[in-house]
Amino acid sequence: MAILQNGPNGPITGKFGSVSAYILNGQNIVRGPKRKRTSPPSEAELLNRKKQKVAGRFAGDNSAIFDFGYQSLAEKGSRIGAFQLAQRHIFKEAMEMDPDNNPFVNPEKLLVFAGQLVPLTNCQINLHGDVIKLKWAPNAQYEDSIYKINLALIGLYGESHLRTSIAEVRQGACSLQFNGISRKNCDYHAYVGIWDTLRDNFSNSIYCGVI
């Protein structure tokens, strides 16, 4: 049974006849019945499914970080949100194949934050006990205090962490107390990006290596 909401001009949800209707990201979607496929999937289709599965799982494991890091590229009212943009990037630009022809996410190609600001350069990261030390090349266009540094630590097979506004870009260096990281049970791939905290703009992240 379908339900017509809010009068004759309102959205329709449910099943009527051979079609179904539902709401997706604020839009009323109507779909016909699925047709059974008679031919087996090709090798290219099977590989594409593998890639989609890897990209979906990786994006899902880090969804909170990607929702934050891609928010400046997500258009309001669009069906494609920050998470979907990140998932698309992972699938198209960060995926590679191992010697056994299995897809994996290459951390060096991954963008954890994405935006239009000019990224940092020459960023170095070191771990000293429970203190993370960062150093980067200052940029004259980021002299205002609104420009902050964001740090993401991505564990490919474990937990990940996000730290925002850990320093002003103009500082050129900072130390971050991170209790318990010296007892980490996996390697973390480190990513740093710039955040314009006034206008909510971001730069693309840069890869700083493993700690």
Image: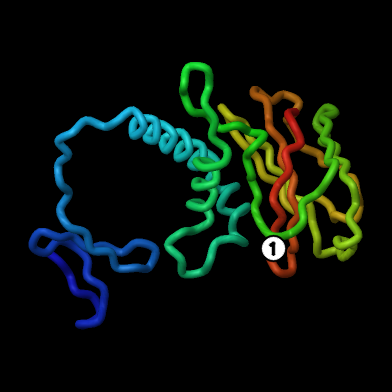
Kindly identify the amino acid type of the residue bearing the numbered disc 1.
Answer: Asn
Would you identify the image quadrant in which residue 159 lies?
top right
Residue for point 85% across, 54% down = 169
Which residue carries the number 1 mark? Answer: 201
Image position of 123 with respect to 189: above or below = below
User: What is the x, y in percent for residue 106?
Assistant: 60, 32
Q: How is the image coloured?
A: rainbow
Q: Is residue 157 left or right of residue 108?
A: left
Q: Is residue 48 left or right of residue 106?
A: left
Residue for point 46% across, 23% down = 102
Q: Secondary structure at mark 1?
A: strand
Residue for point 14% across, 41% down = 36
Q: Residue furthest left?
A: 17
Q: Residue furthest top?
A: 100
Q: What is the quadrant of the C terminus in the image?
A: top right
The residue closer to the viewer here, 169 or 110, is: 110
Would you identify the image quadrant in which residue 208 lies?
top right
User: What is the x, y in percent for residue 188?
Assistant: 68, 30
User: What is the x, y in percent for residue 187?
Assistant: 67, 25
User: What is the x, y in percent for residue 10?
Assistant: 26, 78
Mark 1, other Cα within 10 Å: few <14 / some 14–19 / many ≥20: some
Residue for point 74% across, 49% down = 193
